[in-house]
Image (spheres, helix red, strand yellow):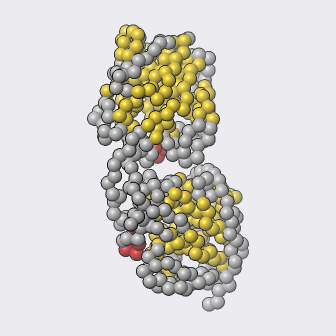
Amino acid sequence: MPINLLTPSIRVKGSELAVGRLSSLMRSGPAAPTTAARGTITWASLGSGSTSSDGTLVSGTVITPEPNKPVIIAISSQVGSGTPNTPTAAGCGMTWTAITNSPMGTGTLDKITLFRGISANPTAGPIVFDFGAQTQQSFTWSIVQATGADISGSNAAGAIVQTVANNQVGNVTAVTGTLNALEHPTNHHLSFTVIRANAVITRDSNFSSPASAVSIGSPNQSLATFNAADRTTCVPSFATQSAGIVSLEIKSATNFDPVRRTITPLILNSTASSTDGTSIATGATLHPSPNRVVYAAVVNRHATNAAVIPTATGCNMTWTVERSIVVSGAARLTVFRGISSAPTSGLVTFDWGVETQTSFVISIISCPNTEISGADGGDATVQIIENSVLAGNTTVPGTLSTFENENNIALAFTVLANNNAITPSAGFTELTDANIGASSTALQVAWAKNLTSYSPTFTSSAAGLIMIEVKSLLAA
């Protein structure tokens, strides 16, 4: 069947945000990453402060978090009677997840709450703490940022190994925070100490202070932050007073393997067609390089149900399906991986058997300096995630787990159920944004080095995303 190939439009964009249903599936097959050393954690204070103004919310110091670094917030509050509400936190374009909350000092009138947050694209601004409808008499807060800490898990959950709180009501001159044995000697003990006095809190001699102690005179309250590597016990001291301490074990990150090559993906072909057919070939001859992994993405639309996963042939290469997802019922995105020691120049053809498709969009990407071991270069793919959203959304986000190596890249394939432009999120480079107007289909490919989260934006549409961590090759 003759196929009328239309010239696709190619666009390069850049920017923002997130929502949707996420399915994260680790690829089986590649060998586990090489065991690597653990790094060193360092701390920086982003801000601290206090206020004695009665209120139900308080806006903290303007802070400037750095991308992809865990931020820990402690806020201590006090009420005149009853039990303080547990606050929420918002600000800096980040999600703030409560780590723990604990009564402090008096047992009921004072509370300390800890939050964690991380973002690939944080913004500068204040953190707003909201206590609902309950008026607090005073607040103190401390905000610290870790470099070299683990960033795995949801919102850097992997950074927190354990949490312990100790509350001492009455006349004490020290309070002890004791963690269980640390998971690793490079992990840190991070502690937040609160006393019910406007007074100095003296650090444990084995600890340092990443943030200045903060205090408020009326009602009296002070908060201090201390940290140390490989220490399970922290004992700050002060003048006789009620006190409390919350201790966290912060996990150090794994050092990346040395001397890995840099991957810079290249677009080999972008093709679009609105001619009905059971197969589609690339619109131009491809010239793949020997022993170089190639990823081929094809989007097809069916009149009613895109149930069939296509096959791919051409260029003397074996093409293996990495992942295939259905978007809005009638559209399907399939990503193949191919490699050959002796590829030939030619076309790549995608075939749906006897199932006639109404439109097609193709993007083929060559990835130099990737791992080529494993069956058909299978070790190049470390992990894959997929996501799809229904009509009415303006983004289709995806988040990979922490990368096996800092030179690895995220390769993202985004499909829309319309022919509008797709804008990549910050830090990603767009390789191609091809569309076909007659049957309303768009396909974008974008990539970034060592960025795990991607949130392309577009005009309201059903959409799908397949994102791959591609492994860099060890230097010779």
> Which residue: 67% across, 63% down?
12
Front residue of 185/396: it is: 185
Q: Position of residue 39 (x, y in %)?
A: 38, 44
Residue extending farthest to the bottom is 1
> Which residue: 68% across, 84% down?
4
Residue extending farthest to the right is 437
Asked whether, in this view, residue 230 is left or right of residue 409, the answer is left
Q: Is residue 83 visible?
A: no
Residue extending farthest to the left is 181
> Which residue: 36% across, 12% down?
173
- Quadrant including the C terminus: bottom left
Q: Is residue 16 above or below residue 225?
A: below
Q: Is residue 341 visible?
A: yes
Residue 128: which quarter of the image? top right
Q: Position of residue 57 (x, y in %)?
A: 61, 26
Q: Position of residue 400 (x, y in %)?
A: 48, 55
Asked whether, in this view, residue 31 is left or right of residue 387, the answer is left
> Which residue: 55% across, 47% down?
120
Q: Position of residue 395 (x, y in %)?
A: 62, 55
- Quadrant including the N terminus: bottom right
Q: Is residue 399 above or below residue 293?
A: above
